[in-house]
Amino acid sequence: MTTGTPRFLPHSAHWGVFSAAWDGHALAVKPDPDDPDPNPLIDNFPDALRHRVRVAAPMVRKGWLERGPGPDPMRGRDGYVAMPWNEVLDLLAKELQRVRDEHGPGAVFGGSYGWSSAGRFHHAQSQVHRFLNTVLGGYVRSVNNYSAGASGPMLPHVIGPLEEVARRNVTWEQVVEHTDVVLAFGGMALKNSRVASGGISRHIERNAMRDAASRGCRFVSISPLRSDLPDEARFEWLPAVPNTDTALMLALVHQLVSDGTHDRAFIARCCDGWERFEDYLMGRSDGVAKSCAWAAPICGLPAQQLSELARSLVGKRTLVVVSHSLQRAEHGEQPVWMGAVLAAALGQLGLPGGGYNYALGTLAHYGKRNNAVPAAALPQGTNGVKAFIPVARISDMLLNPGQPFDYNGQRCSYPHIRLAYWAGGNPFHHHQDLARLAEAFRRLDTFVVHEIAWTATARHADIVLPCTMTLEREDIGATPTDPMMVAMHRIAEPHAESRDDYDIFCDLAGRLGGLEAFSEGRTTREWLAHLYERTRAGLEAMDLEAPTFEAFWQRGKLVLPQRDDDGGILRAFRNDPVCAPLPTPSGKVQVSSPTVEAFGYADCPGHPAWLQPRFAPTAEHPLWLVANQPHAKLHSQLDFGAHSQASKRRGREVCTLHPSAAAARGIRQGDIVRLFNEVGACLASAHLCADMREDVVQLPTGAWYDPALDDQGRPMCAHGNPNVLTRDIGTSSLAQGCAGQLSTVQLERYDGTLPPIRAFEPPGRDMPGR
Ligand SMILES: Nc1nc2c(c(=O)[nH]1)N[C@H]1C(S)=C(S)[C@@H](COP(=O)(O)OP(=O)(O)OC[C@H]3O[C@@H](n4cnc5c(=O)[nH]c(N)nc54)[C@H](O)[C@@H]3O)O[C@H]1N2
Ligand SMILES: Nc1nc2c(c(=O)[nH]1)N[C@H]1C(S)=C(S)[C@@H](COP(=O)(O)OP(=O)(O)OC[C@H]3O[C@@H](n4cnc5c(=O)[nH]c(N)nc54)[C@H](O)[C@@H]3O)O[C@H]1N2
Ligand SMILES: [Mo]
């Protein structure tokens, strides 16, 4: 326990740079004083630090202890027993050895997807990958992520890698100075751009939008919810039907081509495959002209509004923005591709403040300058296993070993996984169809999880190892698009028996004969100094002040130099398409793609196309469910913190629906409602809001999965996790990305017995993890 007056020490989270002081009883936090628009998410820390739902000791599932490794229907329903560290690590080392010896490292799934915390050394996913590579010889990995599962594989076929198109392209400074019109598909919600993996020191987006709007920049938000752009942008709102953006964009381009106002010179100079696309657009290849009149009923907007919008863009510095959310849906590849084609038809690609900045406003990474020196990152070693899955195919893999799947032109097959090792992610937050996910995890021999708290993922594990949370250890906070590197000081001692992921892996590596390979003989402090050295050397090479590690640590913060990428590859390409070709197969913007065409996927043809989703509202499930990012937390992290808890009503997550949809169902403000479809059901508290489409209900992600039975004995989540309602399907055969943003549901007032929220009660020997 600390004594005396606690000092505020610097620290950092994905949601902001802050300082904190702990006196052994209470934690105080305050945002960085130079942050113009601090993120209130730091208020989740004070109550979280010593919350009862923290994992206090290593725990082993009863059934696994009694019966040993193997598939088990009790996983997720069993009690847990505490075990001393030495014993649990002996058991785990033995099990890792068994799986490796009997089945090889290709039977271990170590994808371990998840955001964990901002420090770059204790980045849990890097730690688990490094451990499995250096000690077991590898693991089955996952490719891409839940954020950009469709755009990641798609963009390189069309225009260039995601990082180039999103992260080294149009800056907010350019928007403030140059842009006439921002066409924001999915909006640019401040709740989202307040977050960056690795940390964010200055939240500038609100002011940038206000300054641009004051200069006369026109913002147009195409989104089912008005709240996806801030008032500061003084925007127009086009509440289009979800998952119809491709039709809307096609209609805009159709209008330009019909009027002859598309930029033919730019298309001829910089694009490939326009003719084939134009045949489709104008209906010459399929008999359907993709006109505004055609799109209007699909998008639920008047045809005239679409044609006026198209005409208003001609001759204007226009920036097309497509949020990640659009591609987290069936056929999510299409709006990503079509956004590039729209910007190309307008001739805007590569202009200052114009063109296509896919995902601007989705995260704080985008629209920023890049650092001129490298930042810390833990090397992960070499993976000896070739097998992989697209990250969101986890349940498919566990349920269908040996079965084939398509991915980006390859035919692969699912490996047979015996052991899964997770640290720093919460699949019961991020994955779809949670009942199916639980079934999939029951097929494993062994499921190991390192966690700070009893998430639903921990409650499905066989071995749960308590790890420190970020405030309890030292680290370096950094990301390539933020100039501030933070010496994250330890604020509090580790909770109960929790240990750093690194120390846990060191002890396991020691038992498996791989300590030297994993640790390279370094303590945590030595690793921090070692990782910092890259940055220091970079500064020195630029003849800049290059403080020693000790000096950096004492100062707490270091502002790194940044470079002006000046429009990145798109600007360079526009200026000289011959000498600076795009990194696409043809070197140009691929309006059509022979490569994608040759894959032969019906669900992702050779040019952007409007494809009717398989899952759209029906009489039975008449509402679109928008399952978007939560405003009061990052994903599921610290859902037990005060700021997140204050956002709930009667302990439940809040779902938002239109007053007319509510009235039709006898639902009033604050009622508890049941959302359901053929996948599952959950409860939530109803909030009525007229600023949204009438056929949409919005329930954010992040409420901890809390399975219960209703009065009829039907399963549901009592807390409001929307992933009990989302379908576990890939975006298409090309990317196989997460399609969790949208689902279709019915809704009713819930008059049954209200089950208590048990997600934040730790399990015990006889209290099932559920
Ligand atoms: N329906 C639907 N589902 C979605 C989305 C959607 O739009 N709709 N969005 C998707 C997106 S974009 C994403 S990125 C994913 C996010 O999914 P995740 O990244 O899996 O979600 P997090 O809640 O950030 O999970 C991080 C976990 O790491 C734990 N943790 C934190 N620090 C440490 C540490 O130091 N060590 C260890 N071992 N653990 C730690 C936290 O307690 C938490 O449980 O969700 C996806 N899921
Ligand atoms: N506070 C907070 N911020 C976050 C996160 C968080 O968990 N909490 N997560 C971070 C992460 S990892 C990521 S990847 C980003 C995700 O960034 P996004 O995926 O862009 O964020 P979402 O909030 O899921 O979706 C944005 C909006 O898109 C709209 N939308 C949904 N479907 C459609 C559609 O079909 N068409 C159109 N036009 N609009 C649609 C919804 O109204 C939704 O509010 O956010 C980041 N920022
Ligand atoms: Mo994400």
Image (tube, grey):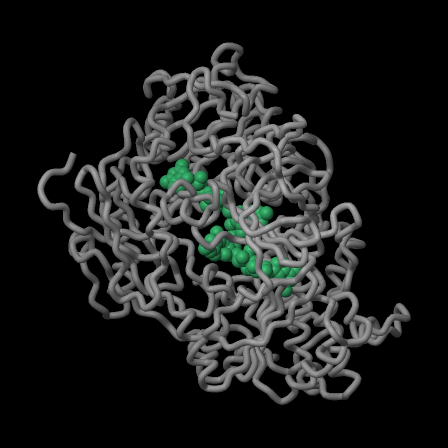
Residue nearest the observer in this picture, 207 or 252: 207
Q: Is residue 288 visible?
A: yes
Residue nearest the observer in this picture, 708 or 318: 708
Residue nearest the observer in this picture, 448 or 610: 610
In the rendered image of this protein, does residue 454 appear above or below residue 175?
Answer: above
Residue depicted at 38% across the width and 32% down the height: 53
Task: Residue 293: name its quadrant.
Answer: bottom right
Percent of width and height locating residue 44: 35, 47
Residue depicted at 43% across the width and 77% down the height: 210
Percent of width and height locating residue 396: 67, 36
Q: Residue furthest right?
A: 287
Q: Is residue 183 visible?
A: no
Q: Residue furthest top?
A: 66
Q: Is residue 658 left or right of residue 261?
A: left
Count of marks overlaid on the render: 0
Percent of width and height locating residue 503: 31, 32
In the rendered image of this protein, does residue 158 appear above or below residue 182?
Answer: above
Q: Quadrant of the N terminus?
A: top left
Percent of width and height locating residue 224: 63, 63
Q: Is residue 213 left or right of residue 305?
A: left
Task: Residue 221: name its quadrant.
Answer: bottom right
Residue depicted at 57% across the width and 60% down the height: 689
In the rendered image of this protein, does residue 53 appear above or below residue 58?
Answer: below
In the rendered image of this protein, does residue 187 appear above or below residue 770?
Answer: below
Residue depicted at 78% across the width and 72% down the height: 277
